[in-house]
Image: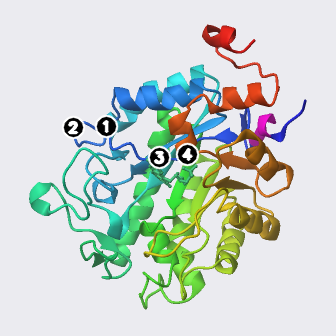
């Protein structure tokens, strides 16, 4: 039987074996607080590649030290960090999966306690290894420390840092780049009028608020060349009066599409506390809206957990790819299991596991 889930997808020079991908998920597993990958990253990402995922997108990875969410995040601002990712990517490739990486700057939501293994939560004090955060404006995310507004020179430095990190990602072997412009981190903070109160060329109109993201995308494209797919993750709505809406997102995506962004990973929220109607497939309609109104390919994400549910999202034209986050943490072999339960024959069951898939 034929299923869209198992149709390959070609983006520029890259063909990905299926449309069941893993979205970026922070592991907070850097041991020496130096942004360097550890055996955990090899096993964690390698396991999902072995489990049949088409592409695995490595977690939010800081392009500069102060862009990390916590000191236990991955970074990609030096060669040691690049080199530590090489075996992770090589193993993913050995299992037939494409390797992506999410490049990130956490802005006013940086310098927080890691999500697990510590007593604290919220902002990490400087005495504990925290740092002064930066943002479009000196407006804190509720409950976190107040950031400092970035200068235009600092914005230019971060644009360059994204491009340099993209170069290191390619040198480490990654096949594609995802820019993190969602979830209330720096680039989303610039996009959203709720967090961007600037009066210069980076604030005010929608065009000005999108300027930083567009500069990042252009700088990455100039660095990686024409063959490498560049994806952008957006929060398609702030779920709040006065915040970004799907209509605003469609305008932003049109600009990104004009600049050659290959696929939009459509998430929502997290720039301000908001009431979000969470349930199965709760963000799929946003991926559909973006795809249908702009023609730019999309990935849908958010409580997609079942093979038929995932297939239906693709079959009804709502997205080109499905991303499964927490379900992949429960079952990194989800793609292999989906093929079996849909009775879809795939060529990439690891030979070591053939006896489980007859
Ligand atoms: C442990 C964990 C870490 C996450 N870290 C990131 C991240 O680094 N970058 C990001 O854009 N989203 C992150 N997310 C959000 C996921 O990528 C995904 O959008 C979200 O979990 C919803 O999908 P799901 O219902 O399939 O889990 C994380 C989610 C989880 C559960």
Residue 312 in the image: above or below residue 340: below
The answer to which of marks 2 and 4 sits earlier in the sequence is 2
Say the numbered circle drawn on residue 25. Answer: 3
The residue under label 1 is 36
The residue under label 4 is 325
Q: Is residue 220 left or right of residue 125?
A: right
* Image location of residue 308, percent across then percent down: 78, 42
Of badges 3 and 2, nearer the viewer stands 3
Instruction: Indicate if the residue with disc 1 has its beta carbon within 8 Å of ligand 1.
Output: no
Q: Are marks 4 and 3 in contact (CB under 8 Å)?
A: yes
Q: Which residues are magenta?
A: 5-10
* Image location of residue 115, percent across then percent down: 32, 51
The CA span between labels 3 and 2 is 19 Å
Q: Are marks 3 and 2 in contact (CB under 8 Å)?
A: no
Residue 89 visible in the snapshot: no
* Image location of residue 93, percent across then percent down: 58, 25
Residue 201 in the image: above or below residue 358: below
Q: Is residue 2 magenta?
A: no
Residue 101 visible in the snapshot: yes
The quadrant of the rendering that contains the C terminus is top right
The answer to which of marks 1 and 3 sits earlier in the sequence is 3
The CA span between labels 2 and 1 is 8 Å
The residue under label 2 is 32
For numbered disc 4, what is the local secondary structure? loop
């Amino acid at each position: 039987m034929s299923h869209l889930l198992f149709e390959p997808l070609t983006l520029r020079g890259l063909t990905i074996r299926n449309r069941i991908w893993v979205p970026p998920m922070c592991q907070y597993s850097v041991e020496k607080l130096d942004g360097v990958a550890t055996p955990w990253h090899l096993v964690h990402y390698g396991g999902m590649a072995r489990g049949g995922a088409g592409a695995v997108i490595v977690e939010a990875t800081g392009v500069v030290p102060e862009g990390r969410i916590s000191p236990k995040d991955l970074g990609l601002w030096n060669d040691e960090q690049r080199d530590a990712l090489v075996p992770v990517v090589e193993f993913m490739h050995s299992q037939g999966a494409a390797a992506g990486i999410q490049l990130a700057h956490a802005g006013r939501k940086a310098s927080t306690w890691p999500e697990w293994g510590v007593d604290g939560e919220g902002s990490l004090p400087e005495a504990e290894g925290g740092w002064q955060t930066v943002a479009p404006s000196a407006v804190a995310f509720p409950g976190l420390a107040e950031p400092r507004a970035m200068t235009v020179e600092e914005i230019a430095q971060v644009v360059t840092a994204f491009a340099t990190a993209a170069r290191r990602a390619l040198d480490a072997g990654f096949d594609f780049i995802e820019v993190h412009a969602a979830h209330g981190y720096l680039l989303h903070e610039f996009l959203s009028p709720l967090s961007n109160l600037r009066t210069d060329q980076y604030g005010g109109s929608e065009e000005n608020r999108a300027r930083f993201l567009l500069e990042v995308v252009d700088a990455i494209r100039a660095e990686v060349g024409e063959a490498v797919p560049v994806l952008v993750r957006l929060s398609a709505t702030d779920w709040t009066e006065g915040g970004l809406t799907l209509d605003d997102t469609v305008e932003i995506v049109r600009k990104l599409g004009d600049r050659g962004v290959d696929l939009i990973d459509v998430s929502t929220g997290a720039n301000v506390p908001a009431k979000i109607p969470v349930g199965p497939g709760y963000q799929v309609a946003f991926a559909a809206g973006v795809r249908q109104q702009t023609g730019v390919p999309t990935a849908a994400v958010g409580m997609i957990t079942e093979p038929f549910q995932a297939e239906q999202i693709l079959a009804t034209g709502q997205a080109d790819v499905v991303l499964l986050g927490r379900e992949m943490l429960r079952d990194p072999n989800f793609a292999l299991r989906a093929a079996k339960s849909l009775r879809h024959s795939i060529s990439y069951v690891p030979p070591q596991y053939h006896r489980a898939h007859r």
